[in-house]
Image: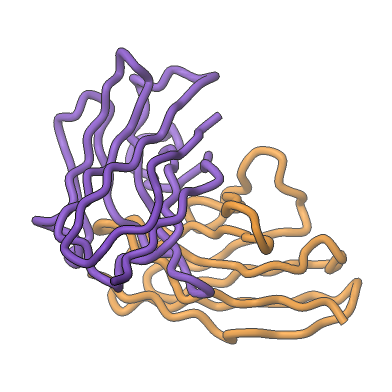
């Protein structure tokens, strides 16, 4: 299995801030990287697929980048609604999730 | 809509069969998946099945104990779980593959069913 490592494991930021969450694969996965948002008590929601393509209905303040082993999820103009845990997931070989990054709004 | 059922409390080495009822989309054209979330922890992909059941895949930790299947006539997905272990305790989600070949992202999820393995 391809191990995925996210950092940081948690962060706290203010409304309007820009934050970055990184995801590193143990081996190259090309651009086979997807991002999810999960609010407490809810199912995960797909935000971005194939590293940088915004899923339908996802606000443009979310953006993804990267290829190979290093990827970034950027949230610009943080909103209270963005308080959640974010997961990366590789789909190059089988499927593996990162351990998650909890985002708290101050 | 994806609605899971069949979760519950089971003893170690016991069995359980999860079901996922799909509606509102052409179920028989989508690869489907099971993803689990351990209590207070992250997500783990468990298994996938192609649209016509030609291909099935499993995470190493469940291979040989769990069996994924589907009935396209009933718009239903299943997960037969045998030889259950305490570490299988989790919320199990049914999830649909994004209908773009080879992307491997999960674009639609059920609300989950809870499986507890305890003596």
Looking at the image, residue B87 sits to the left or right of residue B116; the answer is: left
Q: Is residue A28 visible?
A: no
Q: Nearer the viewer, residue B30 or A25?
A: B30
Q: Residue at x 52, y 43 (%)?
A: B109
Q: Nearer the viewer, residue B25 or A77?
A: B25
* x, y percent for residue B86: 29, 72
Residue B37 appears in which quarter of the rendering? bottom left
* x, y percent for residue B34: 35, 48
Indicate the chain coloured purple by its letter.
B
Colour that chain A carries in the picture: orange
Q: Residue at x 51, y 51 (%)?
A: A49
Q: Relative to B59, does residue B74 appear above or below in the rendering? A: above
Q: Residue at x 28, y 75 (%)?
A: A27
Q: Nearer the viewer, residue A53 or B114?
A: B114
Looking at the image, residue B61 sits to the left or right of residue B109; the answer is: left
* x, y percent for residue A82: 77, 64
* x, y percent for residue A74: 68, 69
Looking at the image, residue A9 sits to the left or right of residue B37; the answer is: right
Q: Residue at x 21, y 52 (%)?
A: B15
Quadrant in which the N terminus of chain A appears: bottom left
Residue A17 appears in which quarter of the rendering? bottom right
């Amino acid at each position: 299995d391809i191990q995925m490592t996210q950092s940081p494991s948690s962060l706290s930021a203010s409304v309007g801030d820009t934050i970055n969450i990184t995801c590193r694969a143990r081996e190259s996965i090309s651009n086979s990287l997807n991002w999810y948002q999960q609010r407490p008590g809810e199912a995960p929601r797909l935000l971005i697929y194939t590293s940088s393509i915004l899923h339908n209905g996802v606000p443009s303040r979310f953006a993804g980048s990267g290829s190979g082993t290093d990827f970034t999820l950027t949230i610009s103009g943080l909103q209270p609604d963005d308080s959640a845990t974010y997961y990366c997931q590789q789909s190059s070989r089988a499927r593996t999730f990162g351990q998650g990054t909890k985002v708290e709004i101050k | 809509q994806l609605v899971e059922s069949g979760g519950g409390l089971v003893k170690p080495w016991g069995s359980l069969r999860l079901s996922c009822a799909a509606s509102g989309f052409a179920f028989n054209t989508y690869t489907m998946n099971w993803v689990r979330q351990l209590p207070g922890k992250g997500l783990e992909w468990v298994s996938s099945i192609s649209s016509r059941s030609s291909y099935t895949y499993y995470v190493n930790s469940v291979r040989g104990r769990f069996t994924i299947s589907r009935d396209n006539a009933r718009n239903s997905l299943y997960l037969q779980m045998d030889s259950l272990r305490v570490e299988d305790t989790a919320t199990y989600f049914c999830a649909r593959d994004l209908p773009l070949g080879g992307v491997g992202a999960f674009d639609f999820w059920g609300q989950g069913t809870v499986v507890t393995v305890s003596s």
